[in-house]
Structures are given as structure tokens and as C-alpha cells.
Image (cartoon, grey):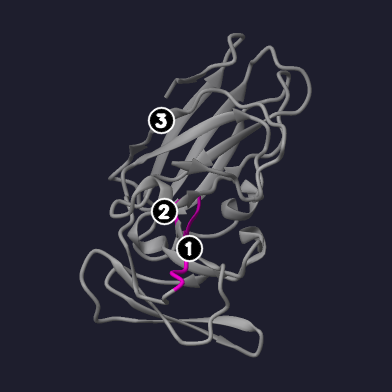
């Protein structure tokens, strides 16, 4: 699995209200490590279920900078089937600045190229539980489709043949977290991250605004431990 981080600020997601059918996620992260200076928590969504690991690049939501004297930081985003969106990137483009189009399971999503930009047109009527992406002739080579599942986009190369893609997201209430350098695309030549840790969320089904929460701490051994 490729795990590279798109530059994104968790405060952006924090200010977005959940869409209908979406779940608001909050990860409270504490840096009590022995690492000096500014370090980051990088939060990766689960991989797409129907594609091999080498066919997708999983990006991450990056926390604000933390130090080992900082208070805990809340990293927030909207997830679940009601919060899906899609972006399309030209070769080497940064996903952080790409426009996102809301999509839903069962959509047929038509991607085209017009006036120097991609267009994304979703419509219902496709197979249930997945998104089917079709490509019009004339799309530039080397680009990728990004399906935003929870905290960050998952990038899939546009086929050279422009054949359709089927994308099946995983809505498991879990993410993968790494602690250290704030990754970016392309990945920096030098970086230092902790071992990846799976973090599972607890959901309050009685809440009028569904919220899934989890808490982690990085201790003096610089390892991530789930604490709540």
C-alpha cells in the first residue's frame, strides 16, 4: 500500500458540517514523545476494497504541528457513505487544492476534459455499493481520480485506455495513523515516521449529530497507543 500524504489542514474539515448521512469523526492526539521540535499526526483512510494495493495511493489528513509540550490536538473530518466526494488530477497536480464534487454509492461518474480543466458529472443508476467512473476521449494522460473517503483522498491512475474504473470504498470505523514528518505529494526525499498504527473509533448511536471518537498518545518510546 502506498501511503503518501496530501498537504491538508485538519481545521478545514473541522469547520465543515456533516453532510446528510455522514458521520463526524474526531481523533484526539497527544504528543508526549521524546522527539524535539514540530512533528505531525498523519491520518490515512482505509484502502479501496476492490483494487490491489499497488493500484492506489492513499493520502492523509495532516494535523497541525505539535510539540511534546503542546496540548492535545483534535483532528476532525466527515466520513461515511454520506460524505463521499471525488476529484480528478492532472499529472503531478497537488490534491490539496483540487475541487471536490460530492458523489454517492451507486453513481455513474462521467469525467471529461474541457477548456483546460476536468469536469465531473455524477448521476444515479449504477451498480449498488460502488462508484463507476467513465472517461471521455481526449483526457490528458498521466492523471488520476481521487475518491475522498473520510479523512483524505485515495488516488487511482486514469487508465491509458480510458476504460471505466470501479471504486469500492471501505467504511470501516478505523484509520491508520503515523507520527513524524508531515508527508506531501510527492513524498520528500528525507522523512521520519513512526510505525503505522490502526486506530478504531467508537460511535455514539444516540447522538443527534453522529460522532465517532478515538484518542491516541505518543509516549517517550515514540510509539502510537490508542487510549480511548
Q: Earlier in the sequence, mark 1 or mark 2?
A: 2
Front one among 15 and 224 = 224
Rendering coords of residue 6 (x, y %):
62, 50
Q: Earlier in the sequence, mark 3 or mark 2?
A: 2
CA distance for labels 1 and 2: 7 Å
State which quadrant residue 89 falls in.
bottom right
Position above or below: 114 against 152: below
Mark 3 and mark 2 residues within 8 Å of each other at the beta carbon: no
**Relative to 205, is 100 on the left or the right?**
right
Q: Earlier in the sequence, mark 3 or mark 1?
A: 1
Residue pictured at 54% horizontal, 30% vertical: 178
> Circle 1 is placed at which residue position?
157
Mark 1 and mark 2 residues within 8 Å of each other at the beta carbon: yes
Disc assigned to residue 198:
3
SS of the residue under disc 2: helix
Quadrant of the snapshot with the C terminus:
top left
Rendering coords of residue 183 (x, y %):
65, 40
Tell me the magenta residue range: 149-160
Position above or below: 139 against 33: below
State which quadrant residue 147 falls in.
bottom left
Front one among 86 and 20 = 86
Q: Residues within 10 Å of mark 3 (few under 14, many from 20)?
A: some
Disc assigned to residue 55:
2
Magenta stretch holds residue 26: no
Rendering coords of residue 48 (x, y %):
35, 52
Rendering coords of residue 152 (x, y %):
51, 52
Quadrant of the snapshot with the N terminus:
top left
Q: Which mark is nearer the camera, 3 or 1? A: 1
Amino acid at each position: 500500500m502506498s501511503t503518501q500524504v496530501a498537504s491538508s489542514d485538519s481545521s478545514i474539515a473541522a469547520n465543515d458540517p456533516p453532510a446528510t448521512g455522514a458521520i463526524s469523526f474526531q481523533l484526539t492526539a497527544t504528543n508526549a514523545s521524546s522527539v524535539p521540535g514540530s512533528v505531525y499526526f498523519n491520518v490515512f483512510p482505509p484502502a479501496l476494497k476492490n483494487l490491489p494495493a499497488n493500484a492506489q495511493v492513499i493520502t492523509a489528513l495532516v494535523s497541525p504541528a505539535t510539540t511534546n509540550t503542546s496540548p492535545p490536538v483534535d483532528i476532525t473530518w466527515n466520513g461515511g457513505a454520506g460524505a463521499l466526494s471525488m476529484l480528478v488530477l492532472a499529472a503531478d497536480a497537488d490534491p490539496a487544492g483540487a475541487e471536490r464534487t460530492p458523489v454517492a454509492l451507486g453513481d455513474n461518474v462521467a469525467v471529461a476534459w474541457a477548456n483546460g480543466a476536468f469536469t465531473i458529472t455524477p448521476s444515479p443508476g449504477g451498480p449498488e455499493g460502488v462508484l463507476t467512473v467513465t472517461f471521455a476521449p481526449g483526457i490528458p494522460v498521466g492523471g488520476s481520480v481521487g475518491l475522498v473517503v473520510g479523512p483524505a483522498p485515495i488516488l487511482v491512475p486514469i487508465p491509458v485506455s480510458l476504460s471505466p474504473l470501479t471504486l469500492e470504498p471501505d467504511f470501516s470505523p478505523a484509520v491508520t495513523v503515523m507520527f513524524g514528518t508531515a508527508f506531501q505529494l510527492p513524498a520528500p526525499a528525507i522523512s521520519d515516521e513512526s510505525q503505522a498504527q490502526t486506530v478504531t473509533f467508537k460511535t455514539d448511536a444516540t447522538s443527534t449529530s453522529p460522532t465517532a471518537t478515538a484518542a491516541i498518545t505518543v509516549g517517550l518510546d515514540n510509539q502510537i497507543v490508542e487510549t480511548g
